[in-house]
Image (cartoon, helix red, strand yellow):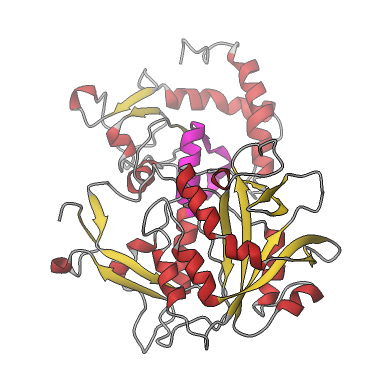
């Protein structure tokens, strides 16, 4: 503390700047009912007491480590209040709780969600000092924790979907929960790679809920094959109309109707990053007969401004191209544009905040909606046409509420290790 100048008058100007530029605006923005010093001068009389508590044992830094030789002293939060700078490695990041933690400087990365969550020691800080909490992490770690939160939100939504019992029995049992866990970052797996989920998702039904794959391949050959598989959809979507994106705005779109069996033939030809990536959704669609779904409205949204990127594709168009990034490389982020969903919802009979006569003319019972996006990952080529291997044919699929199988189950699982049916997680080599 002495070398940092806290015992001399030179510390006061530095602390004043910190108070005015950081502590005070953050405390006001937190909207708490707790008392906050109005000025640095109001806080200043309490600083010597804080400095004394931090430096009462001489060294303000205390090392916490699983290596006993590196342990400087024991921490006992029950015996006394601890005002220290705590430095540590594995022990600190793997379950060691610090009472009154405010500032965290955190750079260690893990490759599994369960380990990352153990490292998140700032979670659960107390309300009475929430405006004091500061976290310093790298952009990569920020992305990791953001991915974990997105995984949890998706997981909770999936549990809500499958919460309704069928024939008095739950659709999802505890051991079948793990396969519903999403993975937004390919390098950040839910658990250690030497473990795997014993339950495997075999079928997932999504009536009235958008299905939007993001695991499209990268290599030109497979992209070309996927694009060529979409030819029947491009052939069908030959009628250009105006659909509503808001109460006042419209966007042009090519639309058409395709039979359910024809769409299945297209989807069955597609390649994915993993062979079974789309299999649970495709198995559901394959089981739907004409009493559940008859056909699909194919929608190819077009840019409202003609200056935006358009190219000929497989002899059709010019068609609008949509720039998307593999934000979770090799997986894309969101494919859909939210303003395109209103027409799709009206086509399957779902309400929207405003009318759309053109979409209503496409609506009928047992009809789904398929929004197709020719996606580019970089600048479009200068030529008037784009090659089939230069585009990713992405889509957002919205099935009608009638698209459910007779047993009422929305999700089905199988067991990888049949000798351990009740185990949720098993060794990968089993």
Q: Nearer the viewer, residue 283 or 326?
A: 283
Residue 205 location in percent, x, y? 46, 74
User: In the image, is residue 383 above or below residue 212?
Assistant: above
29 vs 414, left or right, is right
Q: Residue at x 77, y 63 (%)?
A: 245
Q: Is residue 96 left or right of residue 402?
A: left
Does 136 lie within the magenta span?
Answer: yes
Position of 272 compared to 63: left or right?
Answer: right
Q: Is residue 331 above or below residue 250?
A: above
Front-lying residue, 411 or 267: 267
Residue 392 in sight here: yes
Q: In this orientation, which residue lies closer to the viewer: 11 or 253? A: 253
Res. 91 image quadrant? top left
Does residue 132 show up magenta in the picture?
yes
Name the residue: 64% across, 49% down. 32
Task: Please state which of residues 51 and 90 is positioned toward the viewer in this rendering.
Answer: 90
Report whether residue 36 is seen: no
| The residue stretch that appears in magenta | 126-150
User: Of all residues shown, which one is farthest toward the left?
Assistant: 419
């Amino acid at each position: 503390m002495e070398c940092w100048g806290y015992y001399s008058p030179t510390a006061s100007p530095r602390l004043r700047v910190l108070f005015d530029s950081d502590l005070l605006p953050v405390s006001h923005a937190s909207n708490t009912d707790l008392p906050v010093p109005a000025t640095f001068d109001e806080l200043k009389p309490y600083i010597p007491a804080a400095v004394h508590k931090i430096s009462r044992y001489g060294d303000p830094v205390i090392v916490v480590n699983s290596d006993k030789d590196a342990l400087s002293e024991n921490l006992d939060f029950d015996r006394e209040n601890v005002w220290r700078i705590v430095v540590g490695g594995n022990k600190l990041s793997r379950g060691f709780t610090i009472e009154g933690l405010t500032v965290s400087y955190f750079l260690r990365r893990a490759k599994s969600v369960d380990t990352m969550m153990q490292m998140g020691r700032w979670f659960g800080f107390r309300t009475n000092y929430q405006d004091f909490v500061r976290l310093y992490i790298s952009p990569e770690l920020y992305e990791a924790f953001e991915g974990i939160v997105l995984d949890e939100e998706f997981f909770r939504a999936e549990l809500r979907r499958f919460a309704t019992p069928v024939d008095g029995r739950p659709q999802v049992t505890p051991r079948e929960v793990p396969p519903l866990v999403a993975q937004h970052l390919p390098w950040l797996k839910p658990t250690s790679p030497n473990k795997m989920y014993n339950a495997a998702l075999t079928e997932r039904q999504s009536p009235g809920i958008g299905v939007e794959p993001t695991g499209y391949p990268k290599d030109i050959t497979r992209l070309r094959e996927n694009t060529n598989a979409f030819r029947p959809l491009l052939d069908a979507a030959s009628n250009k109309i105006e659909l509503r994106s808001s109460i006042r705005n419209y966007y042009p779109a090519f639309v058409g109707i395709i039979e359910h069996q024809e769409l299945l033939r297209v989807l069955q030809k597609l390649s994915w990053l993993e062979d079974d990536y789309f299999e649970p959704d495709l198995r559901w669609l394959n089981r739907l007969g004409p009493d559940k779904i008859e056909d699909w409205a194919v929608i190819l949204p077009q840019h409202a401004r003609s200056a935006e990127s358009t190219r000929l594709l497989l002899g059709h168009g010019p068609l609008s191209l949509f720039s998307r990034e593999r934000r979770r490389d090799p997986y894309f982020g969101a494919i859909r544009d939210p303003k395109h969903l209103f027409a799709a919802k009206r086509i399957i009979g779902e309400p929207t905040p405003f009318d759309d006569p053109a979409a209503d003319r496409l609506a009928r019972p047992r009809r789904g909606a398929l929004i197709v996006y020719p996606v580019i990952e970089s600048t479009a080529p200068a030529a008037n046409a784009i090659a089939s291997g230069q585009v990713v044919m992405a889509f957002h699929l919205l099935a009608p509420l009638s698209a459910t199988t007779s047993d009422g189950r929305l999700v089905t699982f199988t067991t990888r290790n049949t000798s351990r049916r009740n185990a949720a997680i098993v060794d990968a080599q089993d």
